């Protein structure tokens, strides 16, 4: 991973890594790229034969197939083109993403976005970004394009961004900003919302290949003291309360966390892929393994 130092001087460098992703479907995109497609073209994957009248390319004339053809047509080989795809990060920008524990969750989100943009550039795919809180943040909207100066500008703007409301309403609008063509969509959030509300907002994204990325911090969820007073704060509404932590309550919190993890897994599996959990720091090699296991 390589560091990126854009942003305020007090901001730690953002680590950018590369991961590799695979699709379980064929794209219809016409742009040449690295992924299996439904487009005939100059690839190496054999598709079949066709009459030279329909595909007038004598360089691909198949003499043996022509001699076997009962209609005595000149047949040429047809190959599948490999094409580029749009890749989007649809990111949660609500106040809960500002949690700072073992790591800064906001910087973890930005590092993930930078790694996706870098991986798209290396693969030859198009990178886009949609950020949301109570609405889609149009000032941070980045339509899909070849990652370069525009994606670097986006990362700098995210580093400087100080907004963020509470709620998941903006996710309902995000599907309107995605292209009609099927895309690879990384939905990034801590998903600290009700499952009923989450399930309702995922429907507009269902036509895409959605990869849920769950950003959690161990100090936020697991590193609870066995005994003593603990001050807890809801970052969404700013409310605080004191809890007397004891072993029974700590075990109940951990059990609730396991139930939550399993409930998220079941919810997202209905839309195609299991969630990818990031505990503390994002590791691009873990995401590569995720695609190998799920594609």
Image: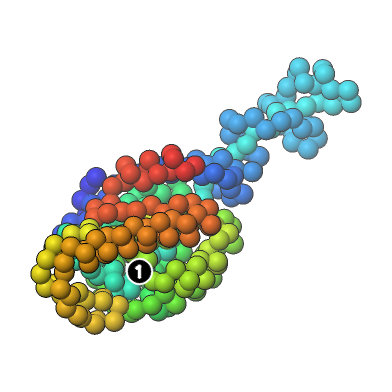
Q: Position of residue 135 (x, y in %)?
A: 42, 78
Which residue is drawn at the image coordinates 30% and 77% (left, top)? 236
Check the image and name the residue furthest to the front.
Answer: 248
**Residue 59 found in image quarter:** top right
Q: Nearer the viewer, residue 135 or 236?
A: 236
Which residue is drawn at the image coordinates 55% and 66% (left, top)? 203
Residue 292 appears left or right of 1: right
Q: Position of residue 139 (x, y in %)?
A: 38, 75
Say what secondary structure mark 1 lies in. loop
Check the image and name the residue furthest to the right.
Answer: 71
Q: Nearer the viewer, residue 194 or 30?
A: 194
**Residue 151 found in image quarter:** bottom left
Q: Nearer the viewer, residue 49 or 22?
A: 22
Q: Position of residue 95 (x, y in %)?
A: 29, 74
Residue 238 appears left or right of 168: left
Residue 143 appears left or right of 221: right
Number of marks drawn: 1
Residues packed near mark 1 inside 10 Å, few (<14), some (14 to 19) or many (20 plus): some
Q: Nearer the viewer, residue 231 or 279?
A: 231
- What residue is pinned by disc 1? 192
Q: Is residue 138 visible to the viewer in this orientation of the structure?
A: no
Q: Quadrant of the N terminus?
A: top left
Q: Is residue 294 visible to the viewer in this orientation of the structure?
A: yes
Q: Position of residue 29 (x, y in %)?
A: 59, 50
Residue 23 appears left or right of 100: right
Which residue is drawn at the image coordinates 77% and 21% (left, top)? 65
């Amino acid at each position: 991973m390589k560091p990126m130092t854009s942003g305020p001087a007090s901001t730690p460098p953002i680590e950018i890594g590369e991961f590799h992703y695979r699709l379980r479907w064929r794209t219809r995109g016409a742009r040449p790229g690295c992924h299996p497609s439904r487009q005939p073209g100059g690839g190496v994957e054999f598709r079949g034969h066709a009459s030279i009248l329909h595909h007038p390319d004598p360089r691909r004339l198949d003499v043996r197939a022509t001699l076997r053809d009962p209609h005595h047509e000149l047949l040429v080989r047809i190959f599948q083109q490999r094409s580029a795809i749009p890749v989007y990060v649809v990111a949660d920008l609500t106040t809960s993403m500002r949690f700072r524990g073992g790591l800064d969750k906001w910087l973890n989100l930005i590092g993930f976005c930078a790694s996706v943009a870098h991986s798209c550039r290396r693969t030859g795919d198009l990178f886009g970004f949609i950020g949301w809180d109570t609405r889609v943040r149009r000032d941070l909207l980045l339509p899909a394009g070849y990652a370069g100066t525009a994606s670097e500008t986006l990362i700098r703007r995210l580093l400087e961004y100080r907004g963020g409301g509470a709620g998941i309403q903006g996710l309902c609008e995000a599907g309107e900003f995605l292209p009609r063509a099927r895309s690879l969509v990384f939905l990034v959030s801590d998903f600290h919302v009700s499952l009923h509300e989450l399930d309702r907002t995922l429907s507009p994204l269902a036509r895409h290949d959605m990869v849920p990325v769950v950003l959690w911090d161990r100090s936020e969820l697991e590193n609870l003291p066995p005994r003593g007073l603990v001050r807890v704060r809801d970052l969404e509404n700013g409310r605080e309360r004191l809890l007397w932590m004891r072993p029974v309550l700590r075990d109940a919190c951990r059990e609730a966390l396991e139930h939550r993890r399993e409930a998220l897994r079941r919810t997202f599996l209905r839309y195609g892929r299991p969630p990818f959990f990031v505990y503390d720091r994002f590791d691009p090699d873990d995401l590569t393994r995720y695609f190998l296991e799920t594609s």
